[in-house]
Structures are given as C-alpha cells and as structure tokens.
Amino acid sequence: MKIYPVFIPHAGCPHRCLFCAQDRTTGQPSIPEAGEVEVWLEASLPLRGVGEIAFYGGTFTQLPLVQQNRYLAMAGRFSAAGRVAGIRISTRPDALDDDCIARLLAAGVTTVEIGCQSFNPTVLNSSGRGHTADDGVSAIRRCRHAGLQVGVQLMPGLPGGDAAEALLSLRRALELRPGFVRIYPTVVIDGTALAELWKAGGFSPWTLDEAVEVCADMLHLCRLDDVPVIRIGLQADAQLEANLLAGPYHPAFGQLVRSRLWRRALLSAGSHGRSISINPDDLSDALGHRAENRDWLAKHGAAVCLTTDKTIARGLLRISGQDFNLDALPPQGGQYG
Ligand code: SF4
C-alpha cells in the first residue's frame, strides 16, 4: 500500500524512552502545521487513490486535542474525496483508551500502529517505556475489536532482552493477530540515555550477525502465521547514520534478514551441488546482499547453482523436480552465523 508519511517527531510524547532520539534521527526539529501538510498532500496525492496518509513519530493520540483534530480533519478531506483510502496514526499502547479509539474511528482513521516494543515487563521497565505488557495486549485487542487495522512495532535487543525474549514477545504479538508487524533491532543513538548506558559499559548491543539471526527467526514465525512484516531494520538515512554510535544497523538490513532465511533453506533442502530453480523475483534475496549467500555456501562446502523460472511461485525452491517451501523448511537460527 502506498503510504504518504507525515513525520511529527516526538510530538505529544510525555516520555523519554531510553533509546529514543527522534529529533536526531529524523533531522526534523519541529512538526509541520496541518496547513503545510495539506499543501504537500494536495501536490502529492493522485485524484483517486488507495493509499493512506500516515502520521508517524511521537505519540499522536497525546497531542493536544485541537492539534489532533486539525490533522485528522485535513486528512479526512482527502479521504472523503477518494484520494486516499484511509488514515494511519502511530502511538503508544497506554494512549489508546476506548474514548480515544472511538474518536479515531469517527475521524476516519483506518490503521493504528502501536509501539509495543516488547511484552516482557523487565525489558519495558529497563527501557523506560512507562507502560506495561498488559497495556500492549489490551490496546491491540481493543483496536482490533473496534475494526481498526493494527500494526505492532517490536524492538528486539533492548536492555534486559535477549533472543529468547524477542521471540516470546513476537509470539505474544502474533497470538493477538495483528494486521502487520515492524521489527526494529535496537541501536544506540547519540543523545539518548541508552548511549550513556552504553558508554558506561552497562549495555551491549547485538552484533549485526546476532541481530540478523534473531530477526530471521522472527520473520520466519511471522511468515508461518501469515502476518506481513512491513519493515525490518531502520530506514537508511544520513541523519541517522551521523548519530549512530553502536548496534546492528545496516542500510540493507531487511535484505540481510530475508537472505538469511534463504541461506538456511538452501542448506536445509540438501541442495548441495544441485541445480535449484526459484522465481526470478526471489533471486536477489536467495543470492544475498552482494551475493554473500553464494559466497558463504561455497566457503562452507555447500555451493549451489541457482537458476530462475517464472512459473515457480515466490518462496519455493525446485530441486530435482521437487518443490520445497521456504517457510516449511525447519528454522535453524543460531547455528550458521
Ligand atoms: S514513546 Fe515513542 S516518541 Fe515517546 S520517547 Fe518513547 S519511542 Fe520516543
């Protein structure tokens, strides 16, 4: 779905989570007026469209009510004119009481992205989130019940968290049947409390390879449950990179993760030395970022010969006439790093 993003960094948020520096990572010191957004949307939206206007960053539902209403009324006019199919907002789990949900629905909001980050009480506490795991569960349930599409954001690798916690938190989210998931492995940004903790030796971020392994396991679980993962890893951005101190950041992180699933599948399918056919649109992920899977498999004595065939469905590997499903192959996280 085409998204028309409006960034309102840190706006409305009464908290300072340990890891958060939205002002630094977006390079946007202030938030736009509804009128400015309207001018941009007028120029950007098609005359008929199926996208969503999305308010990202901060805590939308804790902005002053008058400001929320201005944004929503402006976005609602484009929605009523058929130029988008809906409005999306992102917020915290504890900023979505029933009145708020009813108000969002009445204003034409169709999708709510909820920054749960984890469902582990220790991790939420250590990260200064200021809400409980039950707040996340309740917010997802009530938004879904009201008919909103729900996206869940998770941050594996927060203080107090490990691979097992990341997978348990994801399983909890999946039990609640969200419409989609975003996964942002924790990185250390200058100016945050997490940066101070890291400098003092009180926090070690995951290595890139650890994060890829865990996120590959997470992606595998989401695929098994048929829940789309619409983003893995932070969007590549010069401002973010300028403020990044440590942690598993890579501009092509999502591809590294998808490719890790392919690497595992190519090993699990016993494909060594054989010719494997896949859909051409899967070739880039199967080969890996800068062909690292091809090189890694060759180095580990498991070289494969990949060919493409557009009659093969995405996510399938055809080996000697037999089809293997990428998602049905056993996950083997942790042993191939
Ligand atoms: S709730 Fe969101 S915007 Fe507020 S400090 Fe935490 S991460 Fe940042």
Image (tube, rainbow, N blue to C red):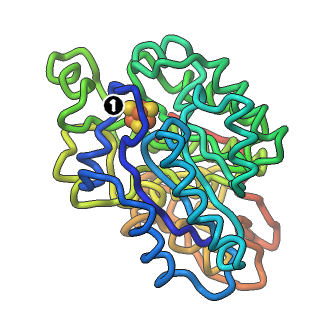
Residue sitting at 39 percent across and 60 percent down? 33
- Say if residue 166 shows up in the picture: yes
Query: Is the residue marked by circle 1 packed among few (<14), some (14-19), or many (20+) residues within 10 Å?
Result: many
Relative horizontal placement of residue 216, taking residue 107 as reference (left or right): left
Which quadrant is the C terminus positioned in?
top left
Q: Quadrant of ligand 1?
A: top left
Depth order, front residue of 200/258: 200
Kindly indicate the quadrant of the structure image that contains residue 209: top left
Depth order, front residue of 131/273: 131
Q: Position of residue 95 (x, y in %)?
A: 58, 30
Relative horizontal placement of residue 206, taking residue 80 as reference (left or right): left
* Mark 1 residue CB less than 8 A from any atom of ligand 1: yes
Q: Position of residue 278 (x, y in %)?
A: 67, 74
Relative horizontal placement of residue 303, taking residue 72 as reference (left or right): left
Q: Position of residue 186 (x, y in %)?
A: 38, 35
Amino acid type at circle 1 is Phe
Mark 1 sits on what residue? 19
- Say if residue 335 shows up in the picture: no
In what element is the residue under mark 1? loop
Residue sitting at 75 percent across and 51 percent down? 106
